[in-house]
Image (cartoon, helix red, strand yellow):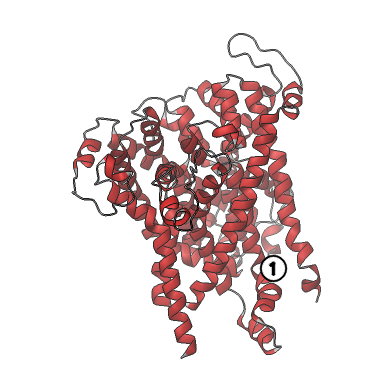
């Protein structure tokens, strides 16, 4: 009985904490239906008059081509999420499930890549990608994002825990290395989805490199467009910003809801090892 | 057990082709920029025309640059306070979540993690209103009811950094709580029960049993957060519009590199600032990696 009471009270406290954590987001969503004057007054929580004109303004491209930015963001994040996961899984498979000379060296290199994140090489990367002719081109943002040191370390560990019997059998059947890799993919499915999701979100959040590289409104990703709109004038259209941010959260939440169960099982397995 | 595979003919081409794509991209988009950055940081700051080789001049200049040290200090304070607050909160949340029934645990974790999905730019826009001078949520709900004067979070040099910290804490706590919850669930039952039977109290069980058991996950969280803090740009960029805030009180290292390169036009010194982050970060991480071993050396020996 005592235990149950404790469980209920902890549950209530946590629910309050969750509401506090989500409050700014609720407020953003409600804010997208309010006028500027109302937004800055925290005393009014619920909009006095609901208006969806800001969504109309947003979608009418008055400030920036919203749907274009959103599509750009989805393109960039999706290709980075899928691409980085594949590359990291391939490299991690080799490092994790084979013993060979130079393996420790590769591992150390992975650690070094984690240590020097892209933000720190943003400036030379910007110059270099320009030299390659990818300025103002989505490829200039996507390609550098395919490298994930964290991913290689993650998959190296995942694969080093995978029972090797299956690999041995395939090996004896005469399957090629690449074929064996393909065979392992279903076994590590939840890890693939978990990492792909994390990378998707991180590339959606990326700021400095897209900001430097994507110049025209047509190529900008959503966070950059929103930040530019915010910075453009002192009298920035708050409600439109909120509408844009709220709509922009939808793909992320959708992907999260899809990946959540896999994320959970992958993490539980990963931590338990 | 793995020998059957390990003795095979390495280097085998099959393995080579599996590794190759990653390394092609690594060379193109990580090593090349890194090398270029190093060279750049040794050259003079000429935007147009030929730049000359100046050796370690930029690094020497940084050592004498008070703004640089300000940025180092700010980044350090930002990282340490973000990490401390986030990890503590996440541990509390994770422990509390374990007490809840499974049915409400799921939605709570899901809800707590949603702030982590929020892009830093959107987050900063939101928090501009949370931190707003008079009417902001923090002032209206916490500062004023406690009887303090309203704080202008984004322009008062004493509070600017805490605005960036609060924002980072809000973003990461849920995710880390989720990670730690999984680690807590993975603790072997027998060890916990044994400690209970031995009469260890709640606190002593936490310090002597739980912490060592979850320390791999904890270390991972720490490392992840620290790297994120050192590479922090988007949040402070939007909050302060690319500046360091009043009196540079919110100037972070990446922002400083950006300012030097793109506002000051000094690509060489900008690259030097970016690269100088690496030793700071590495030092911090080595400290973190050593810490648990020092703390729990005796326990694991027991």
Determine the chain carrying the residue at label 1. Answer: B
**Residue corresponding to mark 1:** B1
Q: Is residue B16 visible?
A: no
Rendering coords of residue A107 (x, y %): 68, 49
Q: Of B25 and B10, which appears nearest the observer?
A: B25
Q: In the rendered view, does A79 fall on the left or right side of B217?
A: left
Q: In the rendered view, does B83 fall on the left or right side of A74?
A: right
Q: Is residue A117 above or below residue B117?
A: above
Q: Residue at x 51, y 37 (%)?
A: B155
Rendering coords of residue A78 (x, y %): 40, 45
Query: Where's the C terminus of chain B, which quadrant?
Result: bottom right
Q: In the rendered view, does A53 fall on the left or right side of A241?
A: left
Disc 1, SS: loop
Q: Quadrant of residue B291?
A: bottom right
Q: Quadrant of residue B7?
A: bottom right
Q: Is residue B241 visible?
A: yes
Q: Quadrant of residue A175?
A: bottom right
Q: Residue at x 39, y 63 (%)?
A: A19
Rendering coords of residue A62 (x, y %): 24, 30
């Amino acid at each position: 009985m005592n235990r149950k009471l404790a469980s209920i009270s902890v549950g209530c406290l946590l629910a309050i904490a969750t509401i506090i954590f989500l409050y700014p987001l609720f407020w953003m969503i409600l804010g997208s239906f309010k006028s500027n004057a109302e937004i800055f007054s925290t005393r009014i929580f619920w909009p006095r008059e609901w208006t969806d004109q800001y969504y109309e303004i947003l979608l009418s491209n008055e400030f920036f081509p919203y749907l274009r930015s959103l599509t750009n963001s989805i393109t960039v994040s999706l290709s980075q999420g899928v691409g980085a996961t594949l590359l990291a899984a391939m490299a991690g498979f080799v490092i994790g499930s084979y013993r060979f000379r130079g393996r420790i060296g590769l591992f150390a290199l992975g650690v070094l890549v984690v240590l020097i994140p892209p933000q720190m090489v943003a400036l030379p990367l910007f110059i270099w990608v320009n030299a390659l002719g990818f300025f103002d081109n989505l490829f200039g943002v996507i390609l550098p994002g395919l490298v994930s040191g964290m991913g290689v370390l993650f998959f190296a560990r995942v694969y080093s825990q995978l029972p090797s019997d299956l690999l041995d059998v395939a090996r004896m059947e005469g399957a090629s290395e690449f074929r064996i890799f393909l065979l392992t993919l279903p076994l590590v499915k939840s890890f693939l989805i978990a990492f792909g999701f994390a990378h998707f979100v991180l590339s959606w959040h990326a700021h400095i490199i897209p900001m430097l590289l994507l110049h025209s409104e047509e190529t900008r990703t959503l966070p950059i467009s929103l930040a530019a709109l915010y910075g453009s004038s002192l009298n920035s259209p708050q409600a439109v910003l909120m509408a844009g941010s709220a709509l922009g959260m939808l793909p992320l939440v959708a992907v999260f809801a899809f990946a959540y169960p896999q994320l959970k099982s992958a993490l539980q397995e990963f931590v338990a090892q | 057990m793995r020998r059957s595979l390990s003795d095979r003919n390495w280097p085998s081409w099959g393995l080579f082709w599996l590794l190759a794509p990653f390394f092609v991209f690594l060379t193109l988009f990580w090593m090349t920029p890194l090398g270029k950055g190093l060279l750049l940081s040794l050259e003079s700051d000429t935007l147009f025309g030929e730049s000359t080789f100046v050796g370690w001049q930029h690094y020497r200049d940084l050592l004498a640059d008070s703004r640089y040290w300000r940025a180092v200090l700010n980044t350090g304070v930002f990282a340490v306070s973000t990490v401390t607050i986030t990890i503590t909160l996440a541990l509390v949340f994770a422990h509390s979540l374990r007490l809840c029934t499974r049915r409400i645990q799921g939605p709570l974790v899901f809800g707590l993690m949603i702030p982590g999905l929020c892009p830093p730019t959107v987050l900063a826009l939101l928090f501009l209103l949370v931190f707003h001078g008079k009417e902001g949520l923090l002032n209206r709900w916490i500062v004023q009811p406690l009887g303090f004067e309203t704080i202008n979070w984004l322009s008062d040099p004493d509070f600017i950094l805490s605005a960036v910290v609060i924002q980072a804490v809000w973003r990461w706590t849920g995710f880390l709580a989720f990670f730690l919850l999984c680690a807590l669930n993975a603790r072997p039952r027998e060890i916990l029960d044994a400690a209970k039977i031995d009469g260890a109290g709640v606190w002593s069980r936490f310090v002597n049993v739980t912490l060592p058991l979850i320390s791999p996950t904890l270390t991972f969280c720490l490392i992840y957060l620290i790297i994120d803090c050192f590479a922090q740009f988007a949040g402070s960029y939007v909050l302060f519009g690319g500046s360091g805030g009043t009196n540079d009180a919110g100037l972070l290292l990446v922002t400083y590199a950006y300012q030097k390169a793109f506002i000051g036009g000094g690509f060489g010194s900008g690259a030097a600032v970016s690269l100088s982050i690496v030793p700071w970060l590495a030092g911090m991480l080595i400290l973190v990696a050593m810490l648990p071993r020092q703390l729990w050396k005796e326990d694991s020996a027991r």
